[in-house]
Amino acid sequence: MNLQLTASPLDLRLRDSFRIARGTQTVAENVLVEIRYGDRTGRGEAAPSPFYGESRATVLAILPRLAEVLGPDPFAIQAAWRGMARMIGGNFAAKAAVETALFDLVAQLADQPHWRLWGLDAAACPPTSFTIGLDTPERMAEKARAATEFPILKVKVGVADDVARVRAVRAARPEAMLRLDANGGWNPKEAVRRLNELAPLGIELIEQPVEATDYDGLRFVREHAPMPVFADESCVRLEDVPRLAGRVDGIVVKLAKCGGLRPARAIMSAAHAHDLRCMLGCMIESSLGISALANLAPNADLCDLDGHLLIDDDPFVGVTVEQGRLTLSDQPGLGAKPRR
Ligand code: MG
């Protein structure tokens, strides 16, 4: 009998409304995918983003069709991938949920955590940053102080007055490593001007200073700003990597953008071959989605896997974060289990 897939809504309420350059979010409308095989259940999470053309509605609409490509064998992940790609383009958050649910099953059947099947060194995970969303400078400083257990903060910028906001965070956390993410909110000249102004505060890197399709803008910022430039929204698929080589210093890999652990792994290898650093990133996701990608953290150079730390009542338990350090689960599978 072919594998059966069920999908259900997964509402994740944010502790605090989360604002970035292009909008504010109070709840993440994700989708839980479960694939049953005998007495086992493989689980995956879709974290759709309208920016990449997906929503809960598109995910729930496409999943029954994606499920048609599943055969009887959970190990046939390459065939499932080809089938999904032939069925429809895009829809990568939905595809990632199916693919990771299969990988969860396979690792459970092998009775090993996914990272161990790849021979990875769990002790090699880079520490994760903790994100401070846009707010008033006072509130951002307060949030930065409340996050004192995290040595690395990622501060959202890309709006008017963001220099004052970063100054407030720096004053609140003089010892922290600060990364910035403009989510495409600046034009290239504005980006260079602000980054030069912010550089004396000690900034490790800037993520997506200009809009996603502005590849030459990325290069311009890289050539004129005093810190490394990373591409997030500009790096979705494997083909984007060679385009970005020479224009940025690193890229951000997310399951919801690329469609799963197989493409994530390919993108990471391609990036390293092009001398780009790799940061693992996330959407607002429960510990289910975060734990899935965290299996590849030993291969990454930087991590920004904090989506599950920004929500109330995480319905899953998996990878843990302490002082920014990730501890991968040693349980068979991708490492997340329902909390109740
Ligand atoms: Mg980003």
Image (tube, grey):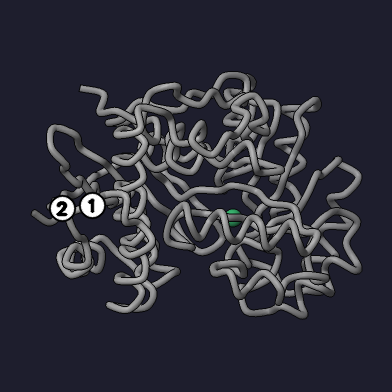
Q: Is mark 1 within 8 Å of ligand 1?
A: no
State the SS at label 1.
loop
Q: Which amino acid type is shown beneath numbered disc 2?
A: Leu
Residue drawn at x 35%, y 33% is 110
Q: Is residue 182 above or below residue 169?
A: below
Query: Is residue 156 or residue 80 the one in the foreground?
Result: 80
Residue for badge 1: 73
- Please identify the quadrant where the N terminus is shown: bottom left
Q: Note whether residue 10 is visible.
A: yes
* Residue 88 rendering spot, x and y as whole percentages: 31, 78
Q: Which amino acid type is shown beneath numbered disc 1?
A: Asp
Query: Is residue 189 or residue 248 the one in the foreground?
Result: 248
* Residue 157 rendering spot, x and y as whole percentages: 65, 54
Residue for badge 2: 3
* Residue 103 rendering spot, x and y as whole percentages: 36, 45
Q: Mark 2 touching mark 1, by CB under 8 A? A: yes
Q: Measure the C-alpha gap from mark 2 to mark 1.
A: 7 Å
